[in-house]
Image (cartoon, rainbow, N blue to C red):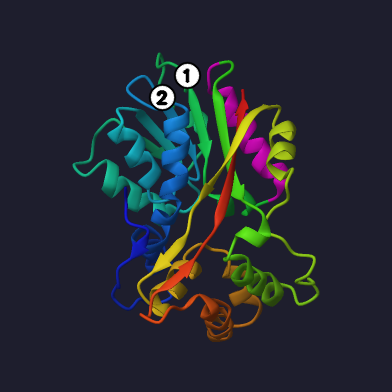
Amino acid sequence: MTPTLVRRHRPSSSSPESRARDWAEIQERMLVPLYEAVYERLEVGSGTRLLSLGCGSGLALLMAAARGATVSGVDPDGRRLALARERLLPEGGGPAHLGHGAPESLMERGTPAFNLVTAFDPLYCAGGSAHGMATALARAASCAERGAPVVLAGWGPQERCAASGALRVAARLADPMCAPARWRPSGRDDLENLAHEAGLRPDGSGRVACPYGYADMGSAVRGMLSTGAFDAAARATDEEQVTKELVEALHPYLRRDGTVWMPNVFRYLIARA
């Protein structure tokens, strides 16, 4: 398993390129337990033809490929996608298909339909409107076999997600009129509602512990900022203010040895195309 506690990394600037690199080197691996739980439950292997929505810098695809799956992925962030290509196509070729566009663009004439679709990154799911995400899921499902599983992921109960405090900071700074008491990472039925809107039939779910572990406060701040959850807050205020309040929100999880440890639970839903 990929280690959850992230080692110290070199100082980083706040450029989009650095944020993408921080995502790949620090934050993306926090969801490894989620990837592993889903792949184990669905028996991902040599017969799997996987399409990943919001594939990020490709770690989940890499793990599926290691199990023998044929993998494809799309992501709206070109910088993350470039890092995915470095991981999956180190010599400019290979079995993976990656792109910016609609999932249909990844299907070559005569190739079989996908038999598994995933949307693992909860912030990718929340990055636009629920209707927009539902439309993306419906288009992806149209590229899959009838009855193929479509996996959606999101935050678990707020009281079991230590990252909730930091994400409330992001919401408050982005919109001061947003009452923190009303804000929540996700609701119990959000994934089911999204599946129904996309024309999918829910068919099982699960919960997975995905703790966020960092070697120091600097790595924790950079990892959290790399998610994109704080971008709107930085635009509404400034990055210095966002960083200051993020450090304050993370301070309760700073341990005596200098590491930062934040227990979280994620939920996934299996729906059928």
Whole-percent x, y for residue 131 in the image: 73, 42
Residue 113 got which mark?
1
Indicate yes or no whether the magenta region holds residue 30: no
Whole-percent x, y for residue 262 in the image: 50, 66
Q: Which residues are magenta?
A: 129-145
- What's under tag 2, amino acid-wise? Arg
The residue drawn where x is 67% and y is 59% is: 158
Whole-percent x, y for residue 139 in the image: 60, 30
| Within-10-Å neighbours for mark 1: few <14, some 14–19, many 20+ | some
The one nearer the camera, 156 or 20, is 156
The residue drawn where x is 69% and y is 34% is: 195
The residue drawn where x is 32% and y is 51% is: 2
Residue 235 got which mark?
none
Classify residue 235 by image quadrant. bottom right
Mark 1 → mark 2, Cα distance in angstroms: 8 Å
Indicate yes or no whether the magenta region holds residue 134: yes
Which residue is identified by label 2? 49
Q: Quadrant of the C terminus?
A: top right
Report helix, strand or loop for mark 1.
loop
Residues marked 1 and 2 touching at CB (< 8 Å): yes
Of the image marks 1 and 2, the number of the one nearer the N terminus: 2
Q: Main secondary structure of the magenta part?
A: helix
